[in-house]
Image: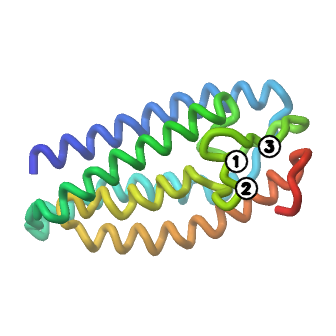
Amino acid sequence: MTWYLLLILLVALERLAELVVSRRNARWSLERGGVVSGQGHYPWMVALHTGLLAGAPLEVWLADRPFLPALGWPMLALVVAAQGLRWWCIATLGPRWNTQVIVVPGLPLVTRGPYRFGWLRHPNYVAVIVEGVALPLVHTAWITAVVFTVLNAAMMVVRIRCENAALATVPGRAGG
């Protein structure tokens, strides 16, 4: 379990790094007239992700979940892949990436990196979904994986509607 706690700690540190980048990027966006949307759901999203990081090791400990190599190693590979996709999104969006929904008027839609695939409008959320399933399953915390997935699906409906509405104001963007 010690190595699993280390993995959770590393993911938590990655999330803190995201928040540092997000705050810096929020300042950049707001200085350029950025418009913030969806502040009502944001605290719930933070709570959900914090619950994932707390719930997985808690379930492993309380339910004495074993590490099953046939499940754990592939799930660990998916966690790593999700981090790679997440940081590809962050690097591609540059100062426009944020954990909040902030759109700077007048800037065109980003269409490079993982955003060049028209059929995949929100690639960062693919990383969130994969990580939300895989991170708990690295150590067979299946209840956490299921609960996070169900709650995250509801959150994604709200979040994606909010982002699509905000992005509908971007030049060159058809629809929402």
Q: Quadrant of residue 34?
A: top right
Task: For the residues labelled 1 and 2, say whether their Cβ atoms are less than 8 Å apart.
Answer: yes
Q: Is residue 158 left or right of residue 82?
A: right
Work out whether mark 3 precedes mark 2 in sequence or the reverse, and give the earlier one: 3
Read off the residue under disc 3.
109
Q: Quadrant of the C terminus?
A: bottom right
Work out whether mark 1 precedes mark 2 in sequence or the reverse, and give the earlier one: 1
Q: Is residue 23 above or below residue 53?
A: above
Residue 30 image position (x, y, % from top left)? 77, 30
Read off the residue under disc 1.
101
Read off the residue under disc 2.
163
Amino acid under label 2?
A: Glu
Q: Is residue 79 left or right of residue 36?
A: left
Q: Local crowd at mark 3 within 10 Å, few (<14), some, or many (≥20)?
A: some
Rounded to the nearest angstrom, the CA distance separating label 1 from label 2 is 6 Å
Q: Is residue 133 left or right of residue 171?
A: left
- Label 2's element? helix
Q: Residue at x 46, y 61 (%)?
A: 129
Task: For the residues labelled 1 and 3, say whether their Cβ atoms are less than 8 Å apart.
Answer: no
